[in-house]
Amino acid sequence: MSGGPLVVVGAALLDGGRLLAARRTGPPALAGGWELPGGKVDPGEGERAALVRECREELGVEVELLQRVGGDWPLPPSAVLRVWTARVVAGVPAAGPDHSELRWLDPGDWYGVAWLDADLPVVRAVQALAGP
Ligand code: DCM
């Protein structure tokens, strides 16, 4: 028994008022939607370590996590999303197999992509914390 809900971690990567959005390649129900990059925490893994790992694997960058964004964001049917703001400390984000496109959203254009349902309220919270 691991206990608790499945935890997915996400990064709101910020760069001078820009926010990184990543367009998912799958599964079919989510393909084409935009998310904050991240993924599932492995058994026994710390959440922050998982997020650093996911950014390395998915985007090819090293990140520094900054600030927790809210609490548990629902990820229907039974998981939760936990999010941190972050910044890139090494490398340039590039789309791997999980994403068809990455986009740095300029200040004022944070809602210019079709965020996944789960991610949209998180983006609003990031804006309230740190946004332009
Ligand atoms: N997910 C999401 N928003 C994110 C990250 C993940 O809605 N920012 C969802 C998509 C999947 C699940 O969490 O249903 C697991 O993510 P992944 O497939 O990336 O491991």
Image (cartoon, rainbow, N blue to C red):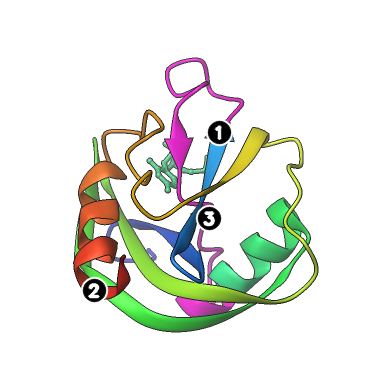
Q: Is residue 4 visible?
A: no
**Residue at x 24% of width, y 74% of height:** 129
Question: Mark 2 packing: few (<14 Cα in 10 Å), some, or many (20+)?
Answer: some
Disc marking residue 38 = 3
Within 8 Å of ligand 1, the CB of disc 3?
yes
- Picture layout, residue 119 above or below residue 29: below
The percent coordinates of residue 128 (x first, y second) are 19, 67
**Residue 40 lies in the magenta-colored region:** yes
Say what amino acid the circle numbered 2 marks. Answer: Leu
Disc marking residue 129 = 2
Report which residue position mark 1 lands on.
23
Mark nearest the camera among 3 and 1 is 1
**Residue at x 61% of width, y 26% of height:** 25
Of 109 and 127, nearer the camera is 109
The percent coordinates of residue 88 (x first, y second) are 65, 73
**Residue at x 56% of width, y 75% of height:** 87
Question: Mark 3 packing: few (<14 Cα in 10 Å), some, or many (20+)?
Answer: many
Say what amino acid the circle numbered 3 marks. Answer: Gly
> If the image is split into quadrants, where does the C terminus sit?
bottom left
Q: Which segment is the magenta one?
A: 24-49
